[in-house]
Image (tube, rainbow, N blue to C red):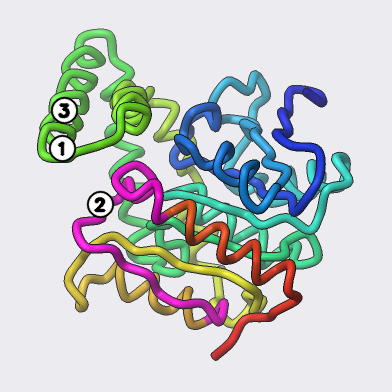
Amino acid sequence: MIDGVRIDGDSGQAVLLLPGGAESCEGFFPGLSEGLLADPGCRVIVHDRPGTGSSAEEGSLADAAAHLDALIERLDCGPVVAVGQSLGGAVAALLARDHPDKVAGVVLLDATPINDPRACARLERVMRVVGPLAGAPGLRRAFSAAVRGSMSRTLRRSDLRPDCAAAHARIADTDIPTLARSVRGIGRLSAGFSEQDLPRLPSAVVTADRKPGDAIRRAHARLAYAFGAPLVCWPGATHSVHLDHPDDTLAVVRDVVSRVRAGERGSG
């Protein structure tokens, strides 16, 4: 542990894990750290940025990339392969755009479409309403029960590994007001986001199993093109691709790490 940051492994390519929403990194990606330690042998950074997880520090989405840049510099472990799911994927894209010298590769796992200003503005508006409602004493229990019920129905339809099912259950207990705070400013960030500013580097963009014309899938395809990455879609994959396809997720991250080690750059 270094100042609240855990680094699994003592050698090899550094991999920075960025969980979705405001979730804690601990246990969010079941089996991923262990798999990367075993093969090809990586250093895996487990960290809750300010405003998320167990961090006691105040933080915002707008500050996330600068915080991670300073973290990588302090740990002297860059450039990293950034692996982000959902909002963590948006943070990974912002980090690669703003601090390309600190990023060797990127894996986006059904990322929040930071390159779709309309979708991000809508998300922020919805959470601006839902967050305070979910925090009200009379409604908090009802909101939590609704979220857990929805997640439970999804879980019953899935055949998850026990560790992935446990992670899924923890996410169902998310603090909705904290989640709402975690997306503050995403509309403005998205409005100023240009895919042309992304570096081309070893990467992969994974999208959930949606119809080809879906707006999120199209946004992910544009991100993949900008990074010079393949757009990956696994049959039946949901937004929680790292839980319903953990072995495929590990394989994708290993592939990006191997391409980083081989010195490849993004392709067309």
Question: Could you tell me which residue is drawn at 73 percent across and 55 percent down?
Answer: 80
Asked if residue 11 lies in the magenta stretch, the reply is no
Counting other residues with Cα less than 10 Å from the Cα at mark 2, is it few (<14), some (14-19), or many (20 or more)? some
Q: Position of residue 182 (x, y in %)?
A: 49, 37
Q: Amino acid at mark 1?
A: Thr
Distance from disc 2 to disc 1, alpha carbons, whole Å, reads 10 Å
Which residue is under mark 2? 238
Q: Which mark is residue 152?
A: 3
- Camera-nearest residue between 219 and 163: 163
Distance from disc 2 to disc 3, alpha carbons, whole Å, reads 14 Å
* Sequence-earlier tag: 2 or 3: 3
Q: Is residue 81 left or right of residue 53?
A: right
Q: Is residue 105 left or right of residue 73?
A: left
Question: Could you tell me which residue is drawn at 75 percent across and 62 percent down?
Answer: 99
Question: Could you tell me which residue is drawn at 40 percent across and 50 percent down?
Answer: 247
Figure check: 42 above or below 178:
below
Which residue is under mark 1? 154
In the rendered image, is residue 176 in sight? no
Q: Is residue 55 left or right of residue 137?
A: right
* Sequence-earlier tag: 2 or 1: 1
Counting other residues with Cα less than 10 Å from the Cα at mark 1, is it few (<14), some (14-19), or many (20 or more)? few
- Camera-nearest residue between 203 and 13: 13
Q: Quadrant of the C terminus?
A: bottom right
Distance from disc 3 to disc 1, alpha carbons, whole Å, reads 5 Å
Q: Position of residue 119 (x, y in %)?
A: 33, 61
